[in-house]
Image: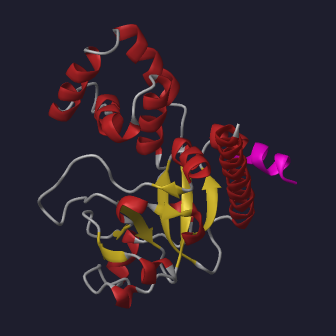
Amino acid sequence: MAIERENLDTNEKSLLEQTEREKILVRLYQNGTNTSDCIAYHGTSLETIQFLITKGFIPGYTAFINNNPELPQHGDIYFMPRLGVFPFDKLPSLPNPSESKNKKYYPKKVEELFPPDDIAKAHRFCSLLSLNIAEYGYDAMFYMDDYNGARTLDGKDAEKRLKLLFTDEQLAFAEKMAKKRKGVILGLKKDALEKYSLSQGDLGSDIRLNGGLNGFPIDIFSGIKPSGKEEKAFLDALKARHS
């Protein structure tokens, strides 16, 4: 009985922690992403937000091991600096935003960003097929890439791997449903730059922070904005639950 009681206490504690993270997410939702303390934007999926609620952190890059340090490393997460707010002096390798031709690289508001739908769609595709996002997220993204009806080489490789696991009908249904997702955008607080290793992203105009194996806790984010109807409905439900 003592062991059962201990497990119950652990479960209760976990549920309380999840509830607190939900309340924080509601506050971030109310904040939005164009607050004065938001220095950069990160596009991600609803599945990532659900993982954050359950586990308490957002994992960084987990896909491939890259020997080239300029490519994504385990624990990396990417952000687009916000013009007029991001401290560009901390990373001189970024294009100089004071030059008018380089302002196009950086948004003033989150509305100027393209929706982060590639990640959102890939994660939804995986969740519909009960696939591990860390293991199959890139396969899902490559599989759904469509360049005028033609697949890339990566897309063809992903298709071969996925067809070993699922029928054409299952893949088609997951792809159709996944394409409805638009994702969410998270705002980054300035003090996160003091807590995590900062470097230039592989796009040249973006940045990356490395959270290692522990990922990134909810307190480094300044706000959240849904890009699609499903994401908004999820956050609205959280808001209603904790209002």
Is residue 67 rendered to the left or right of residue 240?
left
Which image quadrant for residue 210? bottom left
- Of 225 and 147, the residue lying toward us: 225
Q: Quadrant of the N terminus?
A: top right
Q: Is residue 121 above or below residue 92?
A: above
x, y percent for residue 135 = 31, 37
Residue that appears at 24% across and 28% down: 158
Which image quadrant for residue 231? top right
Point out the residue furthest to the left here.
Answer: 67
Whether residue 98 appears in this view of the structure is: no
Residue that appears at 57% across and 56% down: 56
| Magenta span | 235-243
Q: Main secondary structure of the magenta part?
A: helix
x, y percent for residue 145 = 31, 33
Per the image, is 31 magenta? no
Residue that appears at 67% across and 64% down: 32
x, y percent for residue 171 = 39, 17
x, y percent for residue 78 = 38, 62
